[in-house]
Amino acid sequence: MKQSRAMSLVEAATNVVVGYVLAIATQSVVFPWFGIETGLAEHLTIGLAFVGVSLARGYLLRRLFEAIRIRGAQ
């Protein structure tokens, strides 16, 4: 079954949102181990800096593998 572009975007966005929440939690635990003290606002901002890249990466990889799958089926 072929995945539509819209569903690829939904999947990638869901992956990024879950990753974002995990990143904030991880930063809150790991940063102090390295002597990096930041507040919640900084954690959220740092996480947002990577959201766009993560979303694009997930979407583009999904589309790449979908194209490979379609070519292999022909």
Image (tube, rainbow, N blue to C red):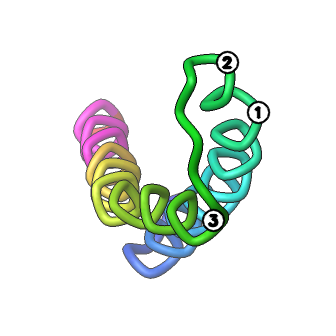
Q: Judge from the rendering whether residue 56 lies leftward or rightward of residue 45; answer left or right.
A: left
Residue beneath disc 1 = 29
Residue type for callout 1: Val
The Cα–Cα distance between marks 1 and 3, rounded to whole angstroms, is: 19 Å
Residue range of the region highlighted in magenta in the rendering? 64-72
Question: Where residue 65 sits in the image (x, y, percent)?
Answer: 34, 39
Q: Are marks 2 and 3 in contact (CB under 8 Å)?
A: no
- Determine the secondary structure under disc 2: helix
Q: CA distance from mark 2 to mark 3?
A: 25 Å
Residue 69 vertical placement versus 13 (above, below):
above
Q: Is residue 69 magenta?
A: yes
Q: Viewer-nearest of labels 2 and 3?
A: 2
Nearest to the observer: residue 21 or residue 7: 21
Residue at the spot of label 3:
17
Residue at horizontal 31 percent and vertical 48 percent from the top: 57
Magenta-colored segment: predominant secondary structure: helix
Q: CA distance from mark 1 to mark 2?
A: 7 Å
Find numbered disc 1 in the image and state the secondary structure of the residue it sits on: helix
**Residue type at mark 2?**
Trp
Amino acid type at circle 3 is Val
User: Is 54 or 38 nearer to us in this picture?
Assistant: 38
